[in-house]
Image (cartoon, rainbow, N blue to C red):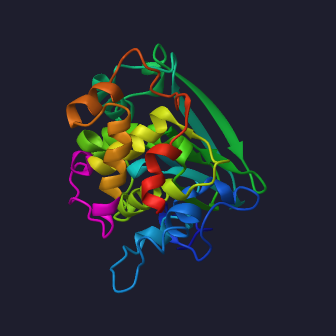
Amino acid sequence: MDIDNPGVLRAALDFPLPQCGPPSPFEKLDDGLRIGWAQTQTAAGVNNTMIPGDVWTVGSWGLAHHAGILTYPKHDADGAGSFLFPLSGIKNWTIVALKDGYMPRNKLPQFLADLSNPDMLLSEFQDNVDAQTIHLRPGDLLIMPPGQIHTVYTPVASFCRGGHFFNYDMMHLTELSRFVDTTKGSCVTNQAHAGTLETLCRLVIALPILPSTRKLYKRALISLCGMVAHHTKYTAEGQPKQESQTIALAEEIANAVLAHFGLDSYELYYEFISNHCEDMLNRGDEVQMYDVLRHYTQ
C-alpha cells in the first residue's frame, strides 16, 4: 500500500491475520472462543452447519495507516472488547469516557452520534466527557472494554495487530454497545460482525458446564441472556438480522435464567436493563446459578 510514500494517505482496516485471540498471557480474556466455541461441541456440534467466517477473523486483524490519518471518535461494532499493539510506528490513542460514568440510556445513542460527528470538536463536550491520550509504541498493549469510545491519530506510518473478544464479565457493556448500534450503528461503529449472535448463543449454552470457580455477575449475566432471548431487538442499524444454528437451545437456557430473576418478558427485561438507579457500567453482584442450570447438564 505504499506505506512509506508521503505523497499518499491511505489506511487498511481490519484485514484478517492467522493468529486468533489476545496475546499471552491474556488469552483467558476471550471467553467467546475459549469457552463459547471450545466447550460446546458436545451440546451443539458444528458438523454440517454453516459458521460465519467472521467468528474466526474477528479475533485477529491488522491495521496499516499512513502518517497523518485521524480517526474520529467511535466505538467498535457489535459489543466486542478489543486489544491492539503496534508492531511499527506510533499511535496516539485517545480514550473518551463519560465524566460522571453515567447518562440516561435513552439519551446515550444520540450523544455518542454527536460525539462522533467530524464537524464537532471534542472540546465541545468537555462538560460531559473526560479524555486521556495514550502514546502507543511497539511493545505496548492496549485493551479496551466493549463500547469504549476512542479517537486515534497516526503521526507516522504504522502497522498494528489487534483483535476482538467477548467476556462473561463484560456482557453488560456488550449489551449497551449493541443497544447503541440498533439506532446509531451507521455513524458510530466501524464494521458489523455476522458471527456475534452465534458466539453469544454458545456463551449461553456453556453456562451450565462452567466450573464453580468461574464467577458470574447479575447485570452481566442478565445482559447476555437478554441479547439471546430477545436477539431480534439487537439488530444493528442498516444490517440484516443475524441467525444462529444454536438459537433454540440457547434461548431455552437464556429464558430460564431470565425467569429466575423474574424477567420473563421483554418488557420486564428492558425495565431492568434501563433502570436509572442501576449503574450501567457495573457488572452487578455475584450470583450462583448451579441450581437453575443443573437440569441442562443431565
Which quadrant of the figure has residue 153? top right
**Whether residue 35 can be seen here:** yes
Relative to the observer, which residue lies in front, 147 or 31?
A: 31
Report the span colored magenta.
Answer: 230-249
Which quadrant of the figure has residue 130? top right
Residue at x 58%, y 37% (from the top left corner): 94
| Count of numbered circles on the image | 0
Would residue 261 be found to the left or right of residue 268 on screen?
right
70 vs 64: above or below: above
Residue at x 32%, y 30% (from the top left corner): 262
The spot of residue 227 in percent (x, y) is: 33, 46
Relative to the observer, which residue lies in front, 175 or 44?
A: 44
Relative to the observer, which residue lies in front, 102 or 252?
A: 252
Residue at x 21%, y 59% (from the top left corner): 241
Which secondary structure is most common in the magenta stretch? loop
**Whether residue 6 can be seen here:** no
The spot of residue 198 in percent (x, y) is: 37, 63
The spot of residue 97 in percent (x, y) is: 52, 27
- Which residue occupies the extreme bottom position in the image? 48
89 vs 224: above or below: below
Relative to the observer, which residue lies in front, 123 or 128?
A: 128
Would residue 132 be found to the left or right of residue 243 on screen?
right
The spot of residue 240 in percent (x, y) is: 20, 60
Query: Is 220 one of the magenta-colored residues?
Result: no
107 vs 63: above or below: above
Query: Is 232 one of the magenta-colored residues?
Result: yes
